[in-house]
Image (spheres, rainbow, N blue to C red):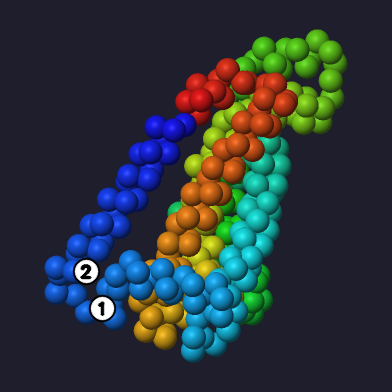
Amino acid sequence: MLRSLKRTVLSFAAFILIWQAAVAFGDFNPALFPKPQKVLEAFQELISTGLQGSSSGISLFAHIQASLARFFAGYVLAVVFGVVLGLLLGWFPRVFAYVNPVIQLLRPIAPVAWLPFIVLWIGIGDVPAVAIIFIAGFFPVLLSTAGAVSSVDPVFLKVAENFNLSQFRTVAGIVFLAAFPQIANSLHLALSTFWIFLVSGEMVGAQSGLGFLVMDAKNCIRADALLAAMITIGGLGVLLDFLIGRLEKWVSNTWGFGIVKYEKERGR
């Protein structure tokens, strides 16, 4: 733990030193490539009063709150619908064989490509950003869940058959728990994608949030505030990744299915 913390501190210290040296000795316009101290001052401004000259006038914490609310709404919707439909399609492979071609057609389409239709159909506000997250996460979760169900150890199904469990109880109480390690791993890996597309959605259809703040800082020609917003996005992404990892491990240990496999896959 201490060694990891030491490496993290040294890594960021080296990054800031290189940044400062590049500004000091490079031929850069300070307005376009500000020094670290200037970005720190922008942080203080965003936290206390919000971006000066902004059309929203709200603080950094208000933008963070708006982004997190949209993120969790889209993430939960994508996980719930993706896992439930993935369990059904994985349990009924013949149905999945008919549905899969359509899924494969829609899956490669970038979520932001749907944004014009979403704005035209729904309008601007919170919904477009939530919809972008949902589209970005739904197909990967669906396909990963269906694949996990199809690869469940037949021993689990034999146990369910011996106890004369119904199909619903077998899928909900046996198959889902046995497939959970693989499903959880896919949810963890997809989290960064969810977060990236949230910011993309907020750049177009929202009037608050970190994506909106990025565009607002660009329109105000404030590179220092822009970098501060980008650092905030990255920091929150790291924090969310850590929290979802802790949640996965807790759920896996609590339910008790596939712990050994889970630990090997996650390297913990």
Disc 1 crowd rating (10 Å Cα; few below 14, some 14-19, many 20+) is few
Relative side of 75 to 230, left or right: right
**Secondary-structure class at tag 1:** loop
Q: Based on the displayed image, in which of its 4 quarters is residue 97 positioned?
A: top right
Relative side of 219 to 180, left or right: left
On the question of residue 3 being in view, the answer is yes
Q: Position of residue 116 (x, y in %)?
A: 53, 75
On the question of residue 202 being in view, the answer is no
Near-viewer residue (147 or 268): 268
Near-viewer residue (54 or 105): 54
Q: Based on the displayed image, in which of its 4 quarters is residue 121 positioned?
A: bottom right
**Secondary-structure class at tag 2:** helix
Number of callouts: 2
Residue at left offset 42%, top offset 86%: 220
* Badge 2 amino acid: Val
Residue at left offset 52%, top offset 55%: 236
Residue at left offset 47%, top offset 26%: 267
Disc 2 crowd rating (10 Å Cα; few below 14, some 14-19, many 20+) is some
**Mark number, residue 23:** 2
Figure check: 175 above or below 159:
below
**Mark number, residue 110:** none
Residue highlighted by disc 1: 30
Figure check: 148 above or below 39:
above
Figure check: 149 above or below 161:
below
* Badge 1 amino acid: Pro
Q: Position of residue 35 (x, y in %)?
A: 29, 70
Near-viewer residue (153 or 8): 8
Separation (CA) of disc 2 from disc 1? 8 Å
For the residues bearing labels 2 and 1, Cβ distance under 8 angstroms: yes
First-in-chain label (2 vs 1): 2
